Image (cartoon, grey):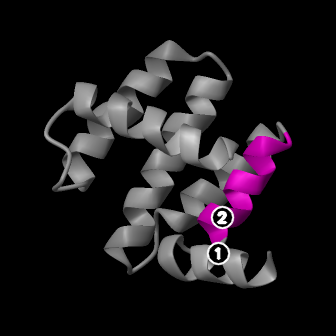
Amino acid sequence: AKNEEAELKKAYGDENIEGLKALINKNYDRALALANVGETSDSEDYKISAVYLKAMIAADQNNKEQEEIEYNRMAEVDSEINDANEAKNEKVALRKIIAK
């Protein structure tokens, strides 16, 4: 599990993986703080991951307005996402992977 976590941190950024762990534990303030730090990264992948994390935090809190904002931001920062609907589908797929 440690090797897997190290690989995830390398791919998505330490702050984003720690933020995801905080989200899983319903520690929303910590998760959001870590996502904010991840978003300041020099790595585009880490920045994109941070916006995805923010969308998952908003969804977990049932904050539809903030969730919609993050979906639109995902479409802006991730060149592989064309619009907010595609971002929603991507987040659903990501949550299924995380739930495993």
The answer to whether residue 63 is left or right of residue 21 is: left
**Residue 49: x %, y % from top left:** 46, 59
Q: Amino acid at mark 2?
A: Ile
Relative to residue 2, is residue 100 depicted above or below? above
Q: Amino acid at mark 1?
A: Asp
Q: Secondary structure at mark 1?
A: helix
Nearer to us in this view, 96 or 45: 96
Q: Residues within 10 Å of mark 2 (few under 14, many from 20)?
A: many
Q: Residues within 10 Å of mark 1 (few under 14, many from 20)?
A: some
| Mark 1–mark 2 CB contact (< 8 Å) | yes
What is the quadrant of the N terminus in the image? bottom right
Magenta-drawn stretch contains 98: no
Q: Main secondary structure of the magenta part?
A: helix
In the drawing, does residue 87 fall left or right of residue 95?
A: left
Residue 17 numbered mark, or none: 2
Residue nearest the viewer, comparing 68 with 37: 68
Q: Secondary structure at mark 2?
A: helix
Q: Could you tell me which residue is drawn at 58 percent across and 56 percent down?
A: 35
Please state the horizontal and vertical placement of residue 78, each as a whole percent of the image.
Answer: 24, 54
Q: Where is 13 relative to 58, above or below?
A: below
Q: x, y percentage for residue 62?
A: 62, 16
Which residue is rendered at x = 39% and y = 80% of the image? Answer: 42
Q: Quadrant of residue 85?
A: top left
- State how far apart marks 1 and 2 are (Cα): 5 Å
Numbered mark located on residue 95 in the image:
none
Residue at image coords 82%, 36%: 26
State the extent of the magenta-drawn residues as a range: 15-25
The residue that appears at 56% across and 47% down in the rendered structure is 97
Q: Position of residue 77 (x, y in %)?
A: 25, 54
Residue picked out by circle 1: 14
